[in-house]
Image (cartoon, grey):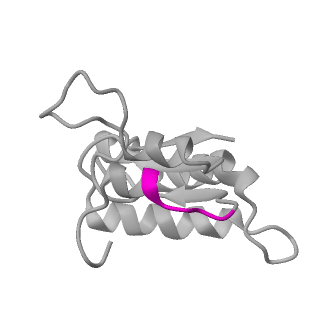
């Protein structure tokens, strides 16, 4: 977010109108906070609990260039034949984006597998 960190309480309190998809490209968006290890909710789960049908997030630190490459390839695969974003394509779009990244042998394995899809 441009004015501060995205907090779970902000997500839960938001009034989303038919939310379908969120891509959380920041670091550690699918893991809980170290300060409260017994809490099982993380940013991506909060988005899904708030009504988002499909969420992509990261499991650990993401290299900025890797994130940019994955996001670019991902959204290229999310567009349907009519030019509209289709959230039901999220899992396949992430799979294709990661496969494209894997062809780049300079990208370490932990950066190739950092993103996960949750939902539809």
Taking the magenta stretch, the answer to whether it contains residue 15 is yes
Residue furthest to the right in view is 82
What quarter of the picture does the C terminus occupy?
top right
The residue drawn where x is 30% and y is 40% is: 110
Main secondary structure of the magenta stretch: loop
Q: Is residue 84 positioned above or below 94 on the image?
A: below
Q: Is residue 27 positioned above or below 15 on the image?
A: above
Residue 106, by quadrant, is: bottom left
Is 95 placed left or right of 60 in the picture? right
Which residues, given as a range, are shown in magenta? 12-17
What quarter of the picture does the N terminus occupy?
bottom left
Q: Position of residue 2 (x, y in %)?
A: 29, 78
The residue drawn where x is 30% and y is 55% is: 7
The residue drawn where x is 37% and y is 34% is: 41
Q: Is residue 107 positioned above or below 65 on the image?
A: above
Q: Is residue 37 positioned above or below 62 on the image?
A: above
Residue 68, by quadrant, is: bottom left
The residue drawn where x is 64% and y is 54% is: 93
Taking the magenta stretch, the answer to whether it contains residue 62 is no
Residue furthest to the top in view is 38
Q: 72 or 4: which is nearer to us?
A: 4
So how many labels did they put on this image? 0
Q: Position of residue 29 (x, y in %)?
A: 34, 47
Is 120 placed left or right of 29 in the picture? right
Q: Position of residue 67 (x, y in %)?
A: 37, 62
Q: Position of residue 28 (x, y in %)?
A: 28, 46
């Amino acid at each position: 977010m441009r004015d501060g960190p995205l907090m779970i309480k902000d997500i839960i309190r938001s009034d989303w109108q038919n939310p379908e998809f969120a891509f959380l490209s920041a670091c550690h968006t699918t893991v809980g906070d170290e300060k409260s290890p017994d809490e099982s909710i993380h940013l991506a789960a909060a988005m899904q609990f708030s009504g988002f049908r499909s969420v992509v997030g990261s499991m650990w630190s993401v290299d900025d260039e890797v994130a940019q490459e994955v996001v670019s390839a991902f959204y290229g695969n999310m567009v349907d034949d009519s030019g509209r974003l289709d959230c039901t394509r999220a899992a396949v779009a992430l799979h294709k984006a990661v496969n494209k990244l894997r062809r780049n042998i300079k990208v370490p394995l932990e950066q190739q597998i950092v993103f996960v899809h949750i939902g539809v």
